[in-house]
Image (tube, grey):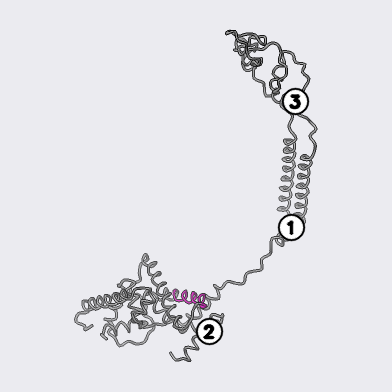
Amino acid sequence: MSREILVRAEEQIARSAAGDQVAFATLVREHQGMVFSLAYHLLRDRSLAEELAQEVFLLLHQNLSSIKSPAHLKFWLRKVTSHRSIDQMRRQQARPQVPLDEVAEPVSVERATDPLLSKSLHKLIAALPEKARLVLILRYQEDLEPMEIAEVLEMPLNTVKSHLRRSLATLREKLTRCIGEVNV
Amino acid sequence: MSRLDDELKVLLQRQEPSPDFTARVLARLNAEQPSAPLPSANFWQRLVAYLQLPTRRWALATAALLLTAAIGVVQYQRTKPHGVEPPTASAPNNNSSSDHTSLVASGTTATLPDTTTDITGVEKSVGEKNRDGESSPSVTPVKDEKFKPYHQTNLPYRKAASPSHEDRLAHAPPPSAGELAKAQLMQALFIASATVNEAKRLAINDE
């Protein structure tokens, strides 16, 4: 992040904390993709994920004075979204889950991947334990290092590494079993 | 980087929420922000506003007047010198043999009559020796019908021995000044309460 962008981001946080709604709207627009995607990949429900993302931004508005830097803002958003998503998932466990097949595909860029592999992978990720799924999402969606994931989830580094290793091994094994001789 | 990593990166890439997401966040923010608290009237302002109606004003004035009167009565009763002295033992001692009980009841050591009555009701002269030849104590139980065996009494039947309710009322000691004051206070409070209730009823009808 160049110095100019950093200074501008810091100004936006300061103006938002001072009550400038335009600056806050800019902050929301910049980070809504990250917050929404984290919630969506965990919950697999667009409306629920949007609701949760809105709550996270409302909470951010209340805590803007405690945000010290743009990096801290990202860290804060990831942490709050992760914890809130896990809470939501636990609440949801009593309710019937929406099958993955019925989930509307979000608007996204065209992928040059195998649709069968994609579909199978979706189901396998959804079947992972919640903490392991969260680690995987933070690793591949946010491109975070295990150390950063450990900080966001307040988890020991070795636990994060073990979650990652075990999840990838499970996915690889099940995927091979499902689609046969695909080199994964 | 394996193929699985690539697949996961594509599958878990960031996605955008609906286009009006930011607007909805701001709308919720504006809706949930606490509005400025209304300037709340203090107790006296609210009381004055409550007493704006003339009926309520009259009711309040009446209640205050009655309360003052009640307090005045109580204070007067407290400060008033007691006019009636309670009966004491220094009453004239024209005792005959039938007036023993009043002397004993008043706790005096006034002169006792020459004759006494033992528990069985047999009168003995003071200083008469008992069965062992010793002198009996000078104070003996008073003469009372109820201490006699029933067959020795003159009572026609047992119920007549106890005083009736009318007798008790007739012989009850006069109420003390404190009791009188208490009774008057209760009366005044009753009148005040009734007046306030009436005023409240008028106020409700007025509304």
Q: Which residue lies furthest to the left in this view?
A: A181
User: Which circle marks residue A97 in the picture?
Assistant: none
| Residue B6 place in picture, x, y as percent | 29, 85
Helix, strand or loop for disc 1: loop
Disc tally is: 3
Residue B37: horizontal and vertical position, in percent? 62, 69
Mark 3 touching mark 1, by CB under 8 A? Answer: no
Measured in 3D between alpha carbons, the distance from the residue under mark 1 to the one under mark 2, in whole angstroms, is 51 Å
| Quadrant into which the C terminus of chain A falls | bottom left
Closer to the camera, B31 or B133? Answer: B133
Q: Specify the amino acid type for callout 3.
A: Thr
A178 left or right, relative to B65: left
Vertical position of residue B103 compared to residue A31: above or below: above
Residue identified by numbered label 2: A23
* Residue interval drawn in magenta: A52-65
In the displayed structure, does residue B122 sit left or right of residue A34?
Answer: right
What residue sits right under mark 3 in the picture? Answer: B88
Protein chain holding label 1 = B
Q: Could you tell me which residue is drawn at 36 percent across and 82 percent down? A: A144
> Residue B87 appears at what percent x and percent y?
75, 26
What SS does tag 2 mark? helix
Mark 2 belongs to which amino acid? Ala
**Amino acid type, residue under disc 1 in the picture:** Leu
- Quarter of the picture holding the N terminus of chain A: bottom left
Disc 3 versus disc 1: nearer the observer: 3
**Alpha carbon distance from label 3 to label 1:** 56 Å
Q: Is A78 positioned to the left or the right of B95 in the image?
A: left
SS assignment for the magenta stretch, majority: helix
Give the residue pinned by disc 1.
B51
Asked whether the residues under the numbered discs 3 and 2 touch, taking CB atoms below 8 Å apart as contact, a structural biologist would say no
Q: Which chain carries label 3?
A: B
Question: Residue at 36% across / 87% down in the picture?
Answer: A109
